[in-house]
Amino acid sequence: MSTITIQNLSKHFEQQAVLQDLNLTIPDGSFFTLLGPSGCGKTTLLRCIAGFNEPDCGRILFDQDDITHVPAHQRNIGMVFQDYALFPDKTVHDNVAYGLRARKVAPEDVKARTAEALALVDLSSFGSRLPAQLSGGQRQRVALARALVIKPRVLLMDEPLSNLDAKLRLSMRDMIRDLQRQARITTVFVTHDQEEALALSDQVAVMQSGSIAQMGAPDSLYALPETAYVADFVGSANLLEVEFSGPGLVMLAGQTLQVDTAAARAGQRNQLVLRAETLELLPRDEQDAPNCLSVTLAGQQYLGSRTLLRVALAGGLTLQVDAPGLQRYQTGQALWLRVPPSCRVICR
Ligand SMILES: Nc1ncnc2c1ncn2[C@@H]1O[C@H](COP(=O)(O)OP(=O)(O)OP(=O)(O)O)[C@@H](O)[C@H]1O
Ligand SMILES: [Mg+2]
């Protein structure tokens, strides 16, 4: 286990700056996720931590040890890749045992620790199979056992679930989280799937063009995004330009709303973040309708447990509303849209 500290890390490929003066502290024993769109530099950063990419400048520390120039095989990391990267001609057992044999562990210990690692991922009876004789989920579990068996200081995973079908992804999430909790290995997990990031992580760093846009616990990132980019990437959000009209007050489509304006700035571009599931539709005959916008129902999709509704504001702006169960409103109907006063205005 180790705290990972990244200081002023930069990396170019040819003319392109892929990581730009990046600073990050990954707490000891935590499950830490790098989240961001394709091309933002997640894999490049992970490979710098692993020692497969040499940074142009900056430092990487495991606890107090500066490992910036230590070769990958001496960093004591376990790595799990998107495409499993198993040795195709070695059995499951030998794939898992590989790292122990390379470290010259005594044969009886290799046997015991390999058996233990295979049991951990529920593959005890698969030791003699070749990777080609396994399903995708089983291969990924072998890759996980291979990474964990060496008792690494740090576990690095690059989109390990993205080649699996949706159902398997959910059960593998549980397995990865349980194993990480038991072993308390500092884990850096890369994904572009915001739901996966929120579900698995103690901390999430949202990356944007080679920098960290915002870092925090899943619930705080979701509830308190600091920029429009983060609000939109971590859970989809309705982002609406509003006029800041005083502490706690904004104007939207000619109506005054009471919202959280702590981060708003007069005279700048302020945007109101409205999470679809926090909005509530009310019939127009409702007399007491504070903090409501006048809207028209433009369309709806019933999805069983919930309904996704599209509503139009005066002036043509549309918003998404995510409401529980079946909603009994007609398309074209005039409604109130209740805005919770806890909704935040952001200014970046
Ligand atoms: N070896 C390389 N040579 C040149 N450019 C590279 C190399 N590796 C990565 N890049 C470039 O660096 C940028 C960041 O790549 P990286 O693989 O880190 O992105 P990513 O966030 O992991 O994306 P994805 O979600 O698609 O895996 C991309 O523009 C990519 O083309
Ligand atoms: Mg990548």
Image (tube, grey):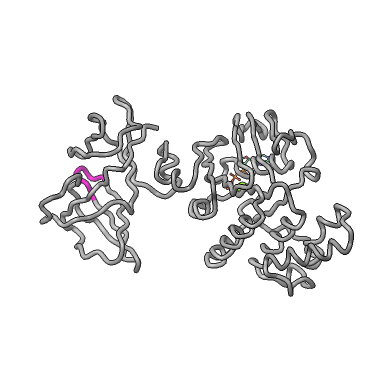
Instruction: Out of 189 and 203, give the one closest to the viewer.
Output: 203
Q: Is residue 85 above or below residue 209?
A: below
Q: Residue 172: say if magenta.
A: no
Q: Quadrant of ligand 1?
A: top right
Q: Is residue 314 magenta?
A: yes
Q: Is residue 68 left or right of residue 207?
A: right
Bounds of the magenta segment? 312-317
Residue depicted at 52% across the width and 51% down the height:
197
Total numbered labels placed on residues in the image: 0
What is the chief secondary structure element of the magenta stretch? Answer: loop
Of residues 178 and 249, which is closer to you in this image? 178
- Tell me the quadrant of the picture where the C terminus can be found: top left
Query: What is the x, y in percent for residue 105?
Result: 87, 56
Query: Where is residue 113, by image quadrant?
Result: bottom right
Q: Is residue 178 left or right of residue 326?
A: right
Residue at the (18%, 51%) spot, across then down: 336
Where is residue 175 drawn, in percent x and y? 60, 62
- Quadrant of res 333: bottom left
Left or right for 132, reference 295: right
**Nearer the observer, 248 or 38:** 248
Query: Image height check: is 195 above or below 348?
Result: below
Which residue is drawn at the image coordinates 60% and 47% (left, top)? 30
Residue 172 rendering spot, x and y as whole percentages: 59, 63
Q: Which residue in the rendered view is the most extreme toward the top?
A: 267
The quadrant holding residue 82 is: bottom right
The residue at the far bottom in this view is 125
Q: Measured from the top left, where is residue 196 in percent x and y?
A: 52, 55
The residue that appears at 17% across and 48% down in the rendered structure is 294
